[in-house]
Image (tube, rainbow, N blue to C red):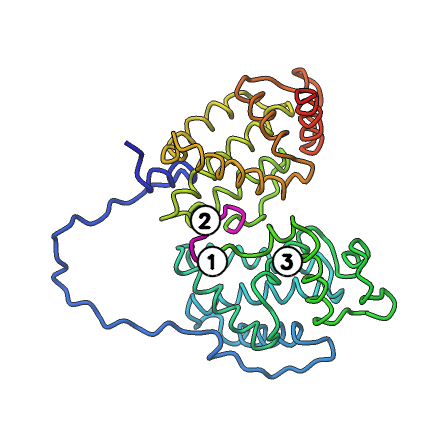
Amino acid sequence: MAQSIFGKMRCLVGSRIKPLPQPGIANPQKLPPPQRIPRLFDVLNKNNRTELGPFEDLNRDLANYIEQNFETSDPMIKMAYGYARRVAMTGMYFQGIVGKNVVDHVQDIFVGLQKMSGQTIDFQREAANQATEVLKSYVPRLKREHEKALLHFAREATTAVELADEYGFMDIDELEDDPVSIDKCLDLIDHVIGVDTSAQLLFCSADKPNSQPRLIDFVEKISSSKLGAFASMCDDIKAASHQFVGKELLFAAAGYATILGRCGVFVGGGVHPKIIEDACVQTKVLIADVAGNQEAINICKRQAVDLASTYVPKLTPEAADVIVEMGLKFERFVKEGEERLSPDEVALRARRIARDKAA
């Protein structure tokens, strides 16, 4: 019998799960009437109109509010503030207004607010939705895929001018557009999504009727492990595991991605085989629900590779198969004592092996 969903979360995060109340035991106390959830939109005053545009206006309005009300604000307001300010600051970075160090500082504040205010699924979803509501009141064109893109390009230290040059987008000129307008930034993101299938996969939400949830939509790139990108992916999967509740396919995809990540670390050298042994034990219950269902297994493996390729761009599905096969056999690309390979070099060597096998 497959292990319960709480057992699966324990495998990913290692946390204690409190037992659920026993059914049939009524609460003798009368429950208070439900309270209206406080909304950031209702308390935020639009006072600033700067020459730098709506993202800077929002940033200043948020700063003014939180400076005056932080101690008395509801946790929901604080978390919605964190989501909204993070997007606003990444937007300003993309425009060329602020530096990467400012974005990193705001990201640290965001993570601190998450730890302070709670990380339940419903709470974080509501806070993110409230942030989007506020963001759209400043930038009506802004969509969720734009938010994801801005966060991604900030992590990759890529500005609109640099991205426009990479994709041959002629509507942005480095000399004339300083800073780049928000409308041109959003036009550029739409262009990239339209011509780059990997960008479509990364930014466009799969929250549509009858669509399968995608691991890539739930795992946010935050970690920076000293063992490299494969290890960072595993850490980020752990951090996102609370969002997988009720989505069995995501647990299984997370299991496959964790195996791939651990194997990617191991075959590059410099770590003990125990990370493979532990990963196999931890992920066994995660993939139990798709065991014997080849179609579901293929979907989960594909989702694992889709996620991993955002951490290690040179990774292909064929290379992923080689990495997992080698890792499970405790085989490495380098001998013990030799310098550990970078994740990209691991992917390239695995691609060569896959190519030779196919020849």
Query: How far apart are the two marked residues, 1 and 2, measured between alpha carbons?
Result: 8 Å
For the residue pair 16 and 205, the one nearer the viewer reads as 205
Q: Position of residue 56 (x, y in %)?
A: 67, 73
Kind of residue at disc 1 = Lys
- Is label 2 in a helix, a strand or a loop? loop
Q: Residues within 10 Å of mark 1 (few under 14, many from 20)?
A: few
Residue at 41% x, 70% y is 74
Residues drawn in magenta: 208-217
Residue at 52% x, 78% y is 44
For marks 3 and 1, the one nearer the N-term is: 3
For the residue pair 121 and 325, the one nearer the viewer reads as 325
Q: Position of residue 55 (x, y in %)?
A: 65, 72
The image quadrant of residue 330 is top right
Label 2 sits on residue: 212
For marks 2 and 3, the one nearer the N-term is: 3
For the residue pair 12 and 136, the one nearer the viewer reads as 136
Q: Mark 2 and 3 residues: CB-CB less than 8 Å, in contact?
A: no
